[in-house]
């Protein structure tokens, strides 16, 4: 069951240039975007994941993700997960990150709030240093979408998680044409690496295929697990 738990954590991941006064017309996403994915383990569909974001002020965005196991799979390992964060594009940093995880018999709650004046992350009385441009793991994905992606190059950013600050390195591997849900896409394959457990983990390789256009939509995410592999494929775009 540990691998299945990792599957859903991965699906919630399923990214520092000045962005003052960010205009939707110049961003790869509009004022609201919701991406819906089918999560499958090898050839078995086990759940649905949603990755979304919406503008909540001139510079701030609510970034969120959910994961729900399908009814037939609930008796084996029921998943009902919600992750949310607040991302300030003008300040170029994440302001808040929270988890509400219901996975099998385990529940987990987490809330991290950033004290921007002190550059400190605060969670249940614990505090740790963060940099002025630190992101949460959820906002980091969308930050990657905003960056120029050149094959052979790497993007490095600061990400806070698990009461620590970690460097997240994203390697741009290659351009590739793939088929997802009956549609063909020209994509850019990237591999995020971070020395910590969680959505981006150095303990197991993860690959993300972004459309090779201005929108940089993640159409597929994939990872090897102990038995078989996990893939998260785009099935719908809601606006």
Image (spheres, rainbow, N blue to C red):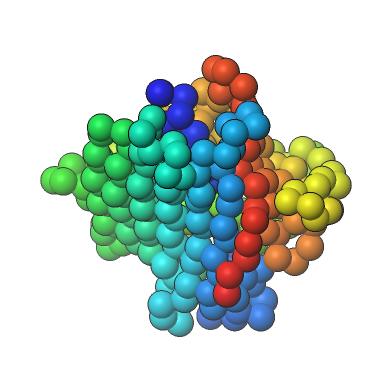
Total number of numbered labels? Answer: 0
Q: Splitting the image into 4 quarters, where does residue 36 fall?
A: bottom right
The reply to whether residue 152 is visible in this rendering is: yes
Give how far across and how far down residue 39 sits, in percent: 56, 42
Above-or-below relation of 33 to 97: below
Q: As drawn, is 200 to the left or to the right of 191?
A: left
* Residue appearing at x 83%, y 53% in the figure: 184
* Residue appearing at x 82%, y 45% in the figure: 178
Q: As drawn, is 46 to the left or to the right of 154?
A: left
* Residue appearing at x 86%, y 47% in the figure: 177
Give how far across and how far down residue 156 sits, in percent: 59, 44
Rendered-image quadrant of the N terminus:
top left
Q: Name the outermost residue toward the left.
A: 125
Rendered-image quadrant of the C terminus:
bottom right
Give how far across and how far down residue 16 sits, in percent: 57, 57
Q: Toward the viewer: 189 or 147?
A: 189
Q: Name the outermost residue toward the top.
A: 226
Give how far across and how far down residue 111 sits, in percent: 25, 51
Above-or-below relation of 77 to 86: above
* Residue appearing at x 68%, y 52% in the figure: 219
Q: As drawn, is 197 to the left or to the right of 234?
A: left
Above-or-below relation of 12 to 27: above
Q: Toward the viewer: 178 or 196?
A: 178
The reply to whether residue 91 is visible in this rendering is: no
């Amino acid at each position: 069951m540990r691998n299945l738990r990792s599957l859903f954590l991965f699906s919630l991941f399923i990214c520092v240039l000045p962005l003052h006064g960010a205009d939707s017309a110049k961003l790869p996403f509009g004022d609201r975007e919701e991406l819906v994915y089918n999560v499958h383990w090898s050839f078995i569909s086990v759940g649905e994941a949603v990755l979304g974001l919406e503008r909540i002020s001139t510079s701030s965005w609510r970034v969120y993700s959910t994961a729900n196991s399908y009814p037939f799979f609930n008796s084996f390992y029921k998943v009902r997960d919600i992750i949310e964060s607040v991302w300030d594009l003008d300040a170029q940093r994440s302001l808040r990150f929270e988890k509400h995880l219901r996975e099998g018999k385990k529940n987990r709650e987490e809330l991290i709030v950033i004290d921007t004046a002190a550059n400190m992350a605060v969670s249940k009385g614990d505090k740790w240093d963060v940099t002025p441009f630190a992101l949460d793991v959820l906002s980091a994905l969308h930050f990657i979408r905003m960056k120029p992606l050149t094959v052979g190059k790497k993007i490095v950013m600061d990400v806070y998680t698990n009461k620590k600050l970690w460097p997240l390195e994203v390697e741009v591997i290659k351009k590739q044409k793939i088929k997802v849900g009956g549609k063909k896409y020209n994509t850019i394959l990237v591999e995020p690496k971070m020395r910590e457990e969680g959505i981006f983990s150095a303990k197991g390789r993860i690959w993300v295929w972004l459309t090779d256009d201005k929108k940089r939509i993640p159409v597929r995410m994939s990872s090897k697990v102990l038995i078989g592999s996990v893939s998260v494929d785009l099935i719908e775009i809601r606006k």
